[in-house]
Each structure stands twice: as structure tokens, then as C-alpha cells.
Amino acid sequence: MRGFALLGVLFANIPYGGDPPVAGIFDESSPFLLDLLISKKFISLFSILFGFGFYIQMSRTEKTGINFRKYFIKRMSLLFLIGTIHCFILWDGGIIMSYAFGGLFLLLIRNWSLKKLVILALIFNVFLTGIVFIGNSALEWRVYDYGLALIWPTTNSYLEYFKVNFIMAPWVNFLNDMPITLFYTFGNILIGLILEKMNFFSPPERLKKLTNRFIILGFSVGVLCS
């Protein structure tokens, strides 16, 4: 499932790799299909799996007597380092660092009740994400010189490429770029944690039909809302 999510993340980022090398009959329909089937779907899925994986790791380390807090802090520190290298040397996307940041916050609330976690997930997914999305789009909180991005596929100078990475990096332009990413990903991470605490992925036999109905409902409503 995680590999499937990463494949979707790859598809979601392909349109931003520069001008298409050839023209095709699907040029007009591709953006629609991207929005309908891919955009925001796989970052949501991957974030949910992150929260799910957090709970699995926590449960397993507690059974073996390992200090989960120390273990997970080391793991998230390494993830943040990998994200930093990726963001500033390879490409300016900084989503990996967002997961590391969210993972550390999970440590503080890992023993909260389901009710508190659901309320917090709603605050992050609906209220905070909504406010920042409206601010970015309607009030122009998020302002960039997008012309800089045209340098990536055309320059032959890695030094110039590195400079653009640093200028455009979301963690450099933190207030412009990171709040919506942090709020949105963490809200979905919380959903993954909640679902696993509820045994959603391994329900008892009597609840399997209800679980399948929720999956069908979520898929159909999700596609229509897109």
C-alpha cells in the first residue's frame, strides 16, 4: 500500500518536471484526470499510512521493551536529515521534513483518547487547512516568483540549480508555504492513527460489512467531491 501511494506521488509530480517533450491527444484531458484521480489523493493516503505505521511501531516496540520515545526521535531526526538533503540538493519539495515534524508531535499525543484525537484531526483537516487554503488563494498569502522555477529544466549550472532550490524551498519560505502542508499532512496522519486504534484495518467479522460500506461511501463521495 505504501508503494502504491508513492507511485501516485510520482504521478502527481510528473507534470511539474518541465515542458512535455511531445504533444498528444490527451493534453486537454490530462489536467482534469490529474485533479480527479491523483491530485491530493496520494499525499492523503501516504499521510494516513504514516499515522498507521506510527501506531504499529509503537505497539511492537512496547512489547519488546524498547524505549519507543528515544527510538522514534532518532528515526524522525534521520528522516528530517534525509528530507533536508533532498530539499536543498535534489529538488525543493519539503514534504519529507513535514512528516518528521508531524511524527515528533505524535509522540506528545500518542496516549490521547480517540475522542480527543478525532477532535484534533477535525481541527487540522477542516478548520486550519481551510483557513490557510482560503488565505493562500483568495487573500494571496502565498506569493512566489514562479519564474524562478523555469530555471530548473533549462540550466546547465548545478550551482544555479542549487541557488534556486534554496530560494524556492518551502522551509525557507516557511510562512508562505509550510502551514498548509503541515496542517493537511498532520490531519491525515491523525486519521491513520485513529483508524488503527479503532482496528479499522483488521475489524472483527461482524463489522467487516460496515467497514466495506464506509470504504465504498468514501470512494464514491470522494470522487464526486473532486
Image (spheres, grey):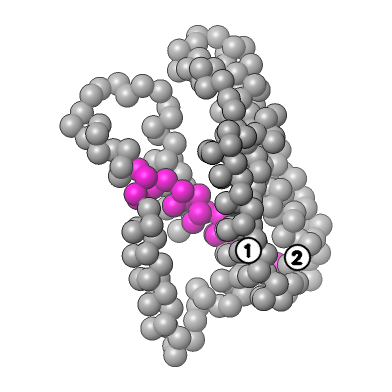
Element assignment for label 1? helix
State the residue at coordinates (56%, 20%).
145
The reply, left or right, for residue 173 in relation to residue 206 is: right
Give the extent of the magenta segment.
Answer: 34-58
Q: Is residue 17 above or below residue 130?
A: above
**In front of the other: 163 or 157:** 163
Which percent across, then down, holds residue 18? Answer: 40, 23
Q: Amino acid at mark 1?
A: Ala
Q: Quadrant of residue 70?
A: bottom right
In the image, residue 47 lies in the stretch drawn in magenta: yes
Residue 41, label in figure: none
- For label 2, the SS is helix
Q: Position of residue 8 (x, y in %)?
A: 41, 47
Residue 40 lies left or right of residue 93; in this view the side is left
Taking the magenta stretch, the answer to whether it contains residue 37 is yes
Q: Looking at the magenta stretch, what is its main secondary structure?
A: helix
Distance from Cα at disc 1 to Cα at disc 2? 12 Å
| Residue 58 screen position, x and y as percent | 70, 67
Q: Mark 2 = which residue?
A: 109
Closer to viewer: mark 1 or mark 2: 1
Query: Residue sitting at 39 percent across and 32 percent down?
Result: 15
